[in-house]
Image: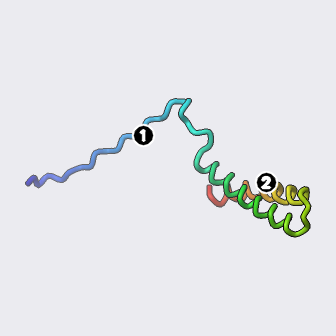
Amino acid sequence: MSAEPTTPHPQSPAPEPPPGARPLLSLHAFTVLLGAAVIGAIAAGLAYAQDHSTADAAIAGGGLFLVAVPGLHHLIG
């Protein structure tokens, strides 16, 4: 056995993928947009269940989606 301390090999950084292979959205952007879409869909469903108006449901869902995006970006970021 050797008494010399072993030093771990430094990890090399992951190679950057070629430009064509990069994802369209980052994981952070995908999570924020998916969460906002779920929140907007729930709001639209509840608004539609309340008064059976498609226009009101679309306004409620879209409005809450637009409010949720910066809020989730701040919370998750």
Question: Which element is circle 1 on?
Answer: loop
Question: Which element is circle 2 on?
Answer: helix
Q: Nearer the viewer, residue 64 or 3?
A: 64
- The structure residue drawn at horizontal position 55% and vertical position 36%, both measured from the top left corner, is 22
Question: In the displayed structure, does residue 14 sit left or right of residue 69?
Answer: left
- The structure residue drawn at horizontal position 87% and vertical position 69%, both measured from the top left corner, is 50
Position of residue 23 measured from the top left corner of the image (x, y, whole percent): 57, 39
Give the number of the disc on residue 14.
1
- Quadrant in which the N terminus is drawn: bottom left
Type of amino acid at the residue the image marks with label 1 = Ala
Question: In the displayed structure, does residue 57 sit left or right of residue 24?
Answer: right
Distance from disc 1 to disc 2, alpha carbons, whole Å, reads 35 Å
Type of amino acid at the residue the image marks with label 2 = Leu
- When the figure is inspected, residue 20 is found, relative to residue 69, above or below; the finding is above
> Quick one: label 1 or label 2, which is nearer the N terminus?
1
Q: Residues within 10 Å of mark 2 (few under 14, many from 20)?
A: some
Q: Give the residue at mark 2.
A: 66
Image quadrant assignment for residue 41: bottom right
- When the figure is inspected, residue 32 is found, relative to residue 47, above or below; the finding is above
- When the figure is inspected, residue 17 is found, relative to residue 52, above or below; the finding is above
